[in-house]
Image: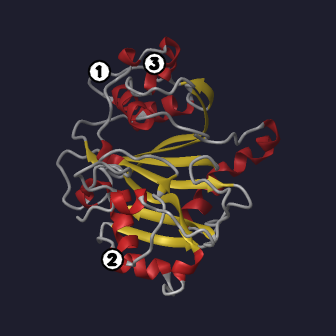
Amino acid sequence: MTDTTVHTQNFQPEENDKLIRVALLVEYCGRFFYGSQFQPGKPTIQQAVQEALSQLHLQTSAVSFAGRTDAGVSAYGQVGHFDIAEGSLVNVQNLVKALNALLPETISVRAAHINAGQTFNSRRDAHCKWYRYVIHNGATRSVWANRVATVHHSKLLDETRMAQAAQLLLGVHDFKSFKDSGTAVTNDICHILHAEVSRDGDFIIFDIAADRFLYKMVRNLVGQLMAIGHTENPLSPETILQVLAERDRRKAAATARPEGLSLMAVLYKSPFNFFEKDVYVQQLKNILKPMESLQNENLFRKAS
């Protein structure tokens, strides 16, 4: 990979250039990357997108994403934004097609909104995010399951207990017990809008949507749900409330592996709902429909 860090650091448009903000809808297979955010000497999603922009001879600000995904974590509906001088897009007729011709097969730009407005911020304007964690709970590993965002767990899990525990997460809670101990974030309060565990054959699927998530929070919750679901040494579903009350990461179960986690969709309110018709955004809206009557009670606080 070529180094584009100087390219973004030296982003100095001409005085008369009109800057426009571009929003991107991106999907990627995280198994091949060290996360979404740039890391020197390592392949990341940000680095790959910046390289593609550079090969199109487009000088842009650094791409900023709605959420920072760890190494191994995938996305179906990641949202990012960057600034560019309006005139530099003249020679690019179709930005999505042009970027995808240069990006590796493990990353795809699914849509772009060329003039998102200078006030749009993909992270700060997000009102809700939906993550999905998939466990292949079969006696032997699956060749096909390894081609998508899943992890293999051979010992039988009780999805009923896991589902009961997930339901206890709904509402506003302090998630200090489930955030990475190294994060500097001090606000541990999150509003869980949807939490569901289901089984489809050998696959256990955990869907969770919230106004915000703490660093490694979803993977830490999955680790706790798996501990509750173990059939050899079962824990009660209420264990998850006890761990929440402790506000101590050491009291919770081990962090689940990153390969099973995907960022499915990010929800924005008008006028920033550029990707309203995206299939995963529509699914997220359907998930949240039963709670629409609560919107006036500040249901959708801004995500961080």
Q: Secondary structure at mark 1?
A: loop
Compare marks 3 and 1 and give the one earlier in the sequence.
1
Quadrant where the N terminus lies? Answer: bottom left
**Distance in Å between CA atoms under marks 2 and 3:** 48 Å
Residue identifier under label 1: 233
Q: x and y percent of residue 250 in the render?
A: 36, 15
Residue 52, can we see it?
Answer: yes
Q: Secondary structure at mark 2?
A: helix
Q: Nearer the viewer, mark 2 or mark 1?
A: 2
- In the picture, measured across the screen, residue 76 lies left or right of residue 136, that is right
User: In the picture, residue 181 is in which quadrant?
Assistant: top left
* Residue toward you, 31 or 185: 185
Question: Front-most of 209 and 42?
Answer: 42
Q: Position of residue 180 (x, y in %)?
A: 39, 28
The amino acid at mark 3 is Thr
Earlier-in-chain disc, 2 versus 1 = 2
Q: Is residue 135 visible?
A: no
Q: Is residue 304 above or below residue 144?
A: above
Give the labeled residue for mark 3. 239
Q: Position of residue 98 (x, y in %)?
A: 42, 81
Identify which residue is drawn at 49% across, 53% down.
65
Of helix, strand and loop, which one carries label 3? helix
Q: Amino acid at mark 1?
A: Asn
Rate crowding at label 1 as few (under 14), some (14 to 19) or many (20 or more) other CA atoms within 10 Å: few
Tell me the tag on residue 102. Answer: 2
Name the N-terminal-most of marks 2 and 3: 2
